[in-house]
Image: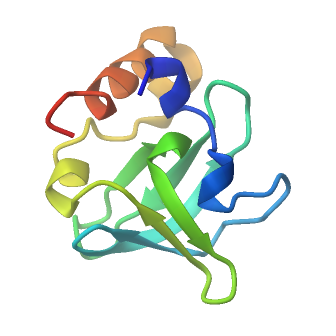
Amino acid sequence: MTEKGIWDYHQDAGYRLGIDLIGYKVEATDGSIGKIDKHSEDMDTAHLVVDTGHWIFGRHVLLPAGTISRIDTAQEKVYVNRTKEQIRNAPEYDEAKYVGESGYMEQLGRYYNQPHM
């Protein structure tokens, strides 16, 4: 997947423009990681911000939209194609960097595009 592709919702995942994903549970390939706190539909930077709650003690993680494998609107769950460990090891979400530093999204894109992913 290219860095650009990692930031786009994929049609086969079941995303429809305008779905409000806030509050949906997020499931990694090996278990639950939290709930969606924010999400963006912005072209080339679409993403989820997940509140991990007790799993990583109050930490928020940013997941590019391209990591979504499936959305179940009936059960309000989003499934991502990453393990809990891969998400735990991701750079921490920092809203100030997200807003102010263009290199921050590039750093996250490189992380989620690594070959071991």
Q: Which one is nearer the viewer's eye here, 95 or 78?
A: 78
In the drawing, does residue 78 fall left or right of residue 73? left
Residue 87 on image: x %, y %: 25, 51
Q: Which one is nearer the viewer's eye here, 16 or 48?
A: 16
In the drawing, does residue 20 fall left or right of residue 63? right
> Could you tell me which residue is drawn at 54 percent across and 65 percent down?
70
Residue 113 on image: x %, y %: 31, 28
4 to 17, vertically: above or below: above
Residue 114 on image: x %, y %: 22, 27
Counting the numbered discs, the total is 0
81 to 74, vertically: above or below: above
Residue placed furthest toward the right: 18
107 to 73, vertically: above or below: above
> Could you tell me which residue is drawn at 45 percent across and 67 percent down?
79
| Quadrant (top left, top right, bottom left, bottom right) of the N terminus | top left
Residue placed furthest toward the front: 12
Which quadrant would residue 75 be assigned to in this image? bottom right
| Quadrant (top left, top right, bottom left, bottom right) of the C terminus | top left
Say how the picture is coloured.
Answer: rainbow
In the drawing, does residue 41 fall left or right of residue 7? right
Q: Which one is nearer the viewer's eye here, 109 or 29?
A: 29
> Could you tell me which residue is drawn at 22 percent across and 72 percent down?
30
Residue 21 on image: x %, y %: 67, 66
> Could you tell me which residue is drawn at 63 percent across and 55 percent down?
12
